[in-house]
Amino acid sequence: MSSREQQPTAAAAISNESHTHEAEQDSTEGHKDNNSTEAEEYRELGTHAHGVAELLIALSGNDIAIELRSPAFNILGFEYAPKTDAEFARLDGSITLLEAASFLEFNADADCQLASAEITQTTQDTTLSHSDFDAIYRLDCAQPDRIALLDVSRLFETFTNIERIDVQWVSDTQQSAAQLSPERPVLAFK
Ligand SMILES: [Zn+2]
């Protein structure tokens, strides 16, 4: 697997500061799950708050690039290196689910098909106490003019530790942001 720095990503299309966070956090100590002030600091850096995932979407003609970034906690329930058979199985199963990306559901008449998926897991700091998943997808949509909605209900159903998804999206003519939750899992492109 190649690293995300070696290729353009949906994130790069939206922000040129997307690769700075790991370095900034190298000296940061581990945090408690979800509710500490330290978690808030992570959130302000735009990355790694347990319970929160990021979705970066770039629409360009038929081609859609999507990057899903999430703390491993949201995906696996743990962030340390797997040790038991159950933990290895959970890691393998989660990567399979991320690769299949069946939770990225555009409105059907846009006729979007997954073209590629690349999943990487990165460790946040030198203590190995935090890690993230970065999933980079490309989709090919036969009717891109009909793209109206992205429903990620199944993402919340599959990875139940995800409480919120911060979305940024950009098209050839528009750019916007949104927050999705299990109660509001559908992104409208307008
Ligand atoms: Zn963490």
Image: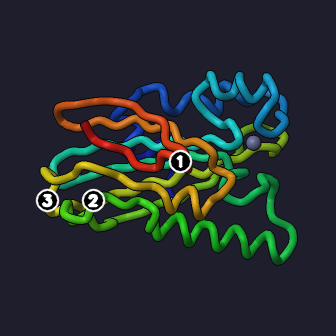
Q: Please state which amino acid type lies under the numbered disc 1.
A: Glu
How far apart marks 2 and 1 lie (CA) works out to: 19 Å
Q: Residues within 10 Å of mark 3 (few under 14, many from 20)?
A: some
Residue 183: which numbered mark, if any? Answer: 1
Q: Is residue 183 left or right of residue 142?
A: right
- Ligand 1 resides in the quarter of the picture at top right
| CA separation in Å, label 2 and label 3 | 10 Å
Above or below 128: residue 93? below
Asked if disc 2 and disc 1 are in contact, CB closer than 8 Å, the reply is no
Q: Position of residue 98 (x, y in %)?
A: 53, 64
Q: Secondary structure at mark 3?
A: loop
Q: Amino acid at mark 2?
A: Asn
Task: Answer left or right for 45 relative to 8.
Answer: right
**Where is residue 11 shown, x and y percent of the image?**
42, 38
Which residue is labeled 3 in the image? 143
Which mark is nearer the camera, 2 or 3? 2
Q: SS class of the residue under badge 2?
A: loop
